Image: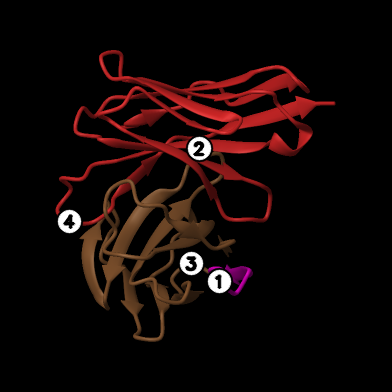
Amino acid sequence: DQQVKQNSPSLSVQEGRISILNCDYTNSMFDYFLWYKKYPAEGPTFLISISSIKDKNEDGRFTVFLNKSAKHLSLHIVPSQPGDSAVYFCAASDSGSGGYQKVTFGTGTKLQVIP
Amino acid sequence: ETGVTQSPTHLIKTRGQQVTLRCSSQSGHNTVSWYQQALGQGPQFIFQYYREEENGRGNFPPRFSGLQFPNYSSELNVNALELDDSALYLCASSPTGGRAGETQYFGPGTRLLVL
């Protein structure tokens, strides 16, 4: 049962253009959503998050949009840079999960930014 | 501030054996979570420890067990290894009780191969 889905395994974007990574979820109890970036041979690194009471959160070149009615979120990177090339994981957690942080990850989207 | 470290980086075991993986959290982080990442998949939550007690568990059998020590180190033990246990094992620490949405800091992982 894949509760967090990233349907695009890969994405290629030209440097300077916008990268849009999409994520869908099925569990309506999720109330925090996070994006992590992962380079080869490294652990995932936190990028940006959004709580379910918001529909947008922005941090520099990175913006996350949340559409609760559609159970969909997206990560926008503008402008894309070659150093952004990595695997991006969408993740979600439920604050009512019994006092602990059970984070559910998607399968990841590999972003390649072409110089 | 040192990051999260894991040892060993790679490990080969045979089916039926037992394995212990180690993690050193960031100083001051009371919560550690362990994840299994199979090839082509996102990390899957195994369990979480808070102040040396397991306070949350994912869909993993009891042969997956853990320990957390007062010096911010922790262990993941897997008994009776199966071929499907071959994966990258990630630990992640967070500063407080693992609230939903709290940033987790991941180690680089231990790649386990079961033959």
Tag nearer the camera, 3 or 2: 2
Of helix, strand and loop, which one carries label 1?
strand
Of helix, strand and loop, which one carries label 3?
loop
Please, what is the three-letter code of the amino acid marked with disc 2? Phe
What is the chain identity of the residue bearing mark 3? B
Q: CA distance from mark 3 to mark 4?
A: 35 Å
The residue pinned by badge 2 equals A89
A38 left or right, relative to A68: right
What is the chain identity of the residue bearing mark 2? A
Labels 2 and 4 positioned on one and the same chain = yes
Q: Quadrant of the C terminus of chain B?
A: bottom right
Please, what is the three-letter code of the amino acid marked with disc 3? Arg
Q: In the depicted view, which residue is nearer to us: A77 or A113?
A: A77
Residue B50 falls in which quadrant of the image?
bottom left
Q: CA distance from mark 1 to mark 2?
A: 21 Å
Span shown in magenta? B1-12
Which chain wears brown? B
Circles 3 and 4 in contact, beta carbons < 8 Å? no
Q: CA distance from mark 3 to mark 2?
A: 31 Å
| Residue B6 disc label | 1
Where residue A56 sits: x, y (%)?
Answer: 40, 24
Crowding around mark 3 (Cα neighbors within 10 Å: few <14, some 14 to 19, many 20+) is some
Of helix, strand and loop, which one carries label 4?
loop
Q: Colour of chain A?
A: red
Colour approach in the figure: by chain
The residue pinned by badge 4 equals A99
Q: CA distance from mark 1 to mark 4?
A: 26 Å
| Residue B15 disc label | 3
Please, what is the three-letter code of the amino acid marked with disc 4? Gly
